[in-house]
Image (cartoon, grey):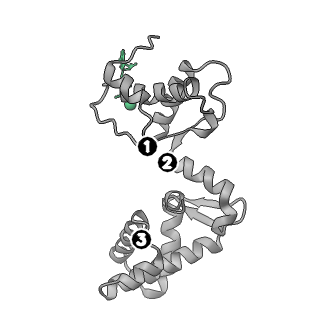
Amino acid sequence: MTNKLNPRQQAAVEYLGGPLLVLAGAGSGKTRVITHKIAWLIKQCDISARHITAVTFTNKAAREMKSRVGELLGGSEGSGLTVSTFHNLGLNILRREHKHLGYKAGFSIFDQQDSESLLKELLRKDNVDDELLKQAQWAISDWKNNLITPEQASSRAKDALELANAMRYSAYQRNLKAYNAVDSMDLIVEL
Ligand SMILES: Nc1ncnc2c1ncn2[C@@H]1O[C@H](COP(=O)(O)OP(=O)(O)O)[C@@H](O)[C@H]1O
Ligand SMILES: [Mg+2]
């Protein structure tokens, strides 16, 4: 395997001044920049692998990156390196830090279906139909993606429906905690 980088890739690998955005087309060598940067940090900058984290969107990309970094590093140089998806990173941090977030050890992760069942259960007393269930799901996921807590959601509600959904969001989070569970969005949000 050749270790060559073009001048722009080389500059990106060696830049240490702060955040760096690499914007380039598919197959143009972005992953190569990241893998070489990891190797550069370890070999040239004496940064230990366990202080480096690489995140990807998919498990497939994480596997590819891990194996490509592995080819650049010798022996135990890469031991302790984290290469994972955002969700897995969140999960691992939550596993380690669960106490600080009010979860007990061995918490469970609700998948899409578990979340929906819980929400349905909470909505049953309101006689909510599928349309309103979908709306509540959307509202909750939108709030979570924007890191808005149930309290903030209720205080900002602009109409009765939004307020109702904020109350559902609050009940939903309370129930998750009671089950000692997180949903897939919490893996990101709770950080
Ligand atoms: N400077 C380079 N010289 C030779 N091959 C390269 C160079 N940069 C990238 N490649 C190769 O091109 C292919 C695509 O690179 P990759 O880093 O996976 O691109 P991206 O992540 O942008 O899709 C890979 O096989 C990689 O090894
Ligand atoms: Mg890539």
Which mark, residue 106?
none
Q: Is residue 127 above or below residue 5?
A: below
Q: Nearer the viewer, mark 3 or mark 2?
A: 2
Which mark, residue 86?
2
Q: Which residue is mark 1?
A: 57
Is residue 36 among what the camera can see?
yes
Mark 3–mark 2 distance (CA, rounded to whole Å): 20 Å
Q: Amino acid at mark 1?
A: Phe
Percent position of residue 27, x then y: 32, 25
Residue at 40% across, 63% down:
145
Q: Which of the four quarters of the rendered structure image does ligand 1 lie in?
A: top left
Q: Residue 75 sits in which quadrant? A: top right
Q: Amino acid at mark 3?
A: Ile
Residue at 42% across, 85% down:
127
Query: Furthest residue to the right?
Result: 105
Q: Mark 2 CB in 8 Å range of ligand 2?
A: no
Percent position of residue 82, x then y: 58, 38
Which mark, residue 140?
3
Q: Are marks 2 and 1 in contact (CB under 8 Å)?
A: yes
- Crowd rating for badge 2 (residues with CA inside 10 Å; few <14, some 14–19, many 20+): some
